[in-house]
Image (spheres, grey):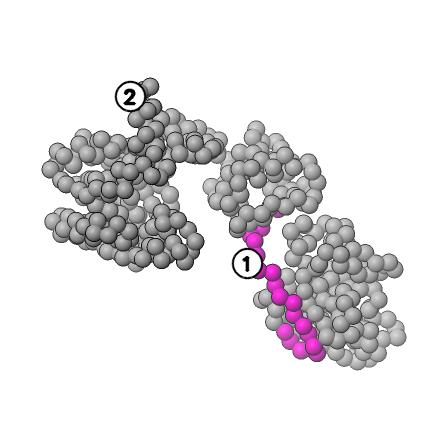
Amino acid sequence: MLSSRVQSFIRLHGLLRPDATHLVALSGGADSVALLLLLQGLGYRIEAVHCNFHLRGPESDRDEQFCTSLCQQEHIALHLAHFDTLAYASAHGVSIEMAARDLRYTYFEQLRRDIGADEICVAHHRDDSVETVLLNLVRGTGIDGLTGIAPRRGHVVRPLLCVSRADIEAYLAAKGQDYVTDSTNLVDDVKRNKIRLDVIPLLQTLNPSVSDAIWRMSCHLAEAQKMADRGLPAEPLTSGHLSIAALRREPSPEYVLWRRLSGLHFTSEQIREMVRSLDAGSGRIWMSSTHMVAIDRDRLVIEENETEAPRHLLLPEPGVYLHEGQRIRVEQGEVDAHFAICRDRHVAMLDASLVQWPLCVRRVQTGDRFVPLGMKGSKLVSDFLTDRKVSVLAKRRQMVVTDASGRIVWLVGERLDHRLRITPDTHRYLKISWEHRP
């Protein structure tokens, strides 16, 4: 029986707890109707959720009415949501399909939390997974893309991945249960529909059981991927560093790097280039929409991108200033018998008579130079930080304090300018304290 196959699949992958409440995404189509009735018949406590995206005119309202009637008939609680999908897509610069997906899953997760549900059940079946494999193959993919749709992704679970569309239709026919049909699924105007309506029928002329064959292959690859991922952390590395020497020792440095950076929006070509550049030395940087990776001596450094560069801050006089979450205190005083120079690296003690107001706090810039305390000649800040073994990405975030002449008076947390140091001839001091330390 179909229900026993689905129950076995649920237990095999640990998808649903018998004592919890679960949300079922109900579109009114055959797949979601079958999922709703199967889970109800298996005794799971369920509530349904239907989204009206207002994209197909009267059809959208027909689907909503069908779902309402079905849930009333089966005594299942139904949550309804209405979206202006076209407006969302326009405002966010995304496709209509992506807009509908974002709206749907954001709402599902919020509703799940609000009602205390365990999981969100969606009705992807075996044929959907086969189509996904073929789509990924056409686009170019690694092993992950050939494993198809996963039974679980966070709180979203897919109990029907073990059955085909034909199985679902036969189940509904046997029950005498009707459903609605989305007319856009019958037009081969998008890639997935082309796979469904054109490519798979062509492949079936070579092998009538091609969908079964592709499904079995994806299951085998999913098991192989578990072996490949053994020993790798479950979560991607969103910040930190990876040892280049350790990467080189891996059987496939490219695969390990791809898994560690998964979800950080780097392309396959960027990751291949990282691997090719492991011996290139410090300085190479790759950017994605959310993160950056840099080669820094014997390691790869990973950091999140900044939303925007910090603004310059003028310090016109002594006082306390706030800047990008940091508190900066500027004080002046007399050098008397009780005076002592503070040795804290986050405090700068300067000869006040040599500093020209106003001061400015900013990021280091290309070509910045200063005379490090204890040296006679000037040095590029970038070279100084390199000598200090500061990472490539940390160098980009280094703060400096300059005076009105443009001189760097302090490389924050690192070194003063030698020309502004306190000497036996100093009568007044200027003290700059970085109280919330970088």
Point out residue 90 in the picture as x, y percentages from the top left corner.
40, 56
Q: Is residue 324 visible?
A: yes
- Distance, label 2 to label 1, CA atoms, is 52 Å
Q: Secondary structure at mark 1?
A: loop
Residue 208, label in figure: 2
Residue found 53% across the figure and 50% down from its top: 289
Q: In the image, which is nearer the foreground, mark 2 or mark 1? A: 2
Say left or right for 357 vs 238: right
From this view, report whether residue 254 is shown above or below residue 415: above
Task: Please give the residue where the numbered disc 1 appears in the rendered image.
Answer: 307
Say left or right for 361 vs 163: right
Q: Secondary structure at mark 2?
A: loop
Point out residue 230 in the picture as x, y percentages from the top left corner.
48, 33
Query: Image quadrant for the N terminus?
Result: top left
Amino acid type of the residue that numbered disc 2 sits on in the rendered structure: Pro
Point out residue 264 in the picture as x, y percentages from the top left corner.
51, 46
Closer to the camera, 366 or 421?
Answer: 366
